Amino acid sequence: MKKFLHIYISCSFLLALPFLIGAEPDFYGKINASYENAKKSSVQDTGFENNASRLGVKGKFKLIEGINISYQIENEIDPTDGKADGEKVFKERNTFIAIETSLGKLFTGTHDTALKLSQLKVDLFNDTRADIKYLFQGENRMNSFVGYTSPEIIEGLKVTLNSVSQTTGSFESYALNYSNGSIKLALASDSNAKGYDNKRVASTFSMKSIGVDVGLLYQTTKKLSTGISESGHVVSLKKKVSNKGSLYMQTSSSDIKLESGKQNSYGYTHKTSDVSKIFIHLSNRENSNKAKNVDYLSVGFEYKF
């Protein structure tokens, strides 16, 4: 009860403070849901799926000259059954408070790790049944989190450092990110992340001559309890086929979570407005245990506010 009271008071203070100093918070959200058919062996299952729909509030205000305070409170919601986390209505997403200066950004709370963010936008099926998290370790959002992101060291180059206190000991995550126009590159490493060491390199870029956006990712993972290392890769392609429509595909291969794991996904999305879209996805995930192979067909929509 005391823990809940402390959280309530902290959240209330964060929400009230910007009003007191004249800086209004920004309320935002996203509804993303789909109707899916999943076929596993000879068994088919259909129903509505929530794809990380969320509500949040964020803001930034000047504390003193040269020092800004920023904050975010974000929770997942489930419009399909009203329960985002078991019997709970809300499931915590990135929720933090940060100090921002010319020396960088220092933040604490609950947040995606540097390695998770280093996938850039390679994963075109993020937050769906074809998410790379089903094949790869390291897609972690951690609490008891302290992070730092540097300003640009040289043009386009930034460093992110994370430290998390766990029951299994301290955990660190590091990333080096470079951006130059459409070209983005990330190198990242996890140490003792839920029992694994992960190393990842990712890049996204545009092949403007043919109008295709490309995403590439390669990762190695070592399970600390066994010392066994595995690896995997992702390749994604996206092409705009009209003013409002895009085709995309993604292929992944990894032994990290599934022996001889493979996932091939195809999609089409059509913008119905500046804040909404509809989509159709077809995905197949297979591994050495054929009883766990599964095919997905989903039709869904997204609305942002």
Image (cartoon, grey):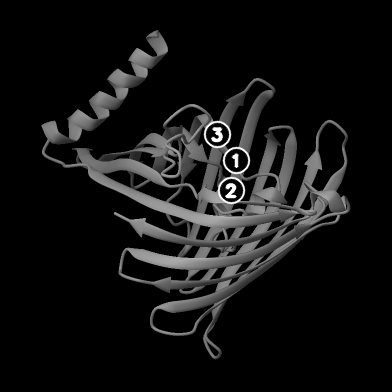
Q: Label 1 belongs to which residue?
A: 140
Q: Is residue 207 above or below residue 273?
A: below
Disc nearer the start of the sequence (3/2): 2
Discs 1, 2 touching: Cβ within 8 Å: yes
CA distance for labels 3 and 1:
6 Å
Residue 82 placement (x, y as % from top left): 42, 36
Discs 3, 1 touching: Cβ within 8 Å: yes
CA distance for labels 1 and 2:
6 Å
Residue at the image position 24 percent from the left and 24 percent from the top: 13
Residue 95 placement (x, y as % from top left): 41, 35
Image quadrant holding the C terminus, namely bottom left
Res 25 → quadrant: top left
Most extreme residue toward the top, as rendered? 2
Instruction: Evaluate whether residue 259 shows in this view.
Output: no
- Residue type (three-letter) at the residue carrying disc 2: Lys
Left or right: 267 in relation to 291: left
Residue at the image position 49 percent from the left and 77 percent from the top: 246
- Residue type (three-letter) at the residue carrying disc 3: Met
In the drawing, what numbered circle is on residue 107? none
Asked which secondary structure carries label 1, the reply is loop
Q: Label 3 belongs to which residue?
A: 142
Q: Label 2 belongs to which residue?
A: 116
Instruction: Evaluate whether residue 162 shows in this view.
Output: yes
Circle 3 crowding by C-alpha within 10 Å: few under 14, some 14–19, many from 20: many
Left or right: 241 in relation to 196: left
- Residue type (three-letter) at the residue carrying disc 1: Asn
Circle 1 crowding by C-alpha within 10 Å: few under 14, some 14–19, many from 20: some
Circle 2 crowding by C-alpha within 10 Å: few under 14, some 14–19, many from 20: many
Disc nearer the start of the sequence (1/2): 2
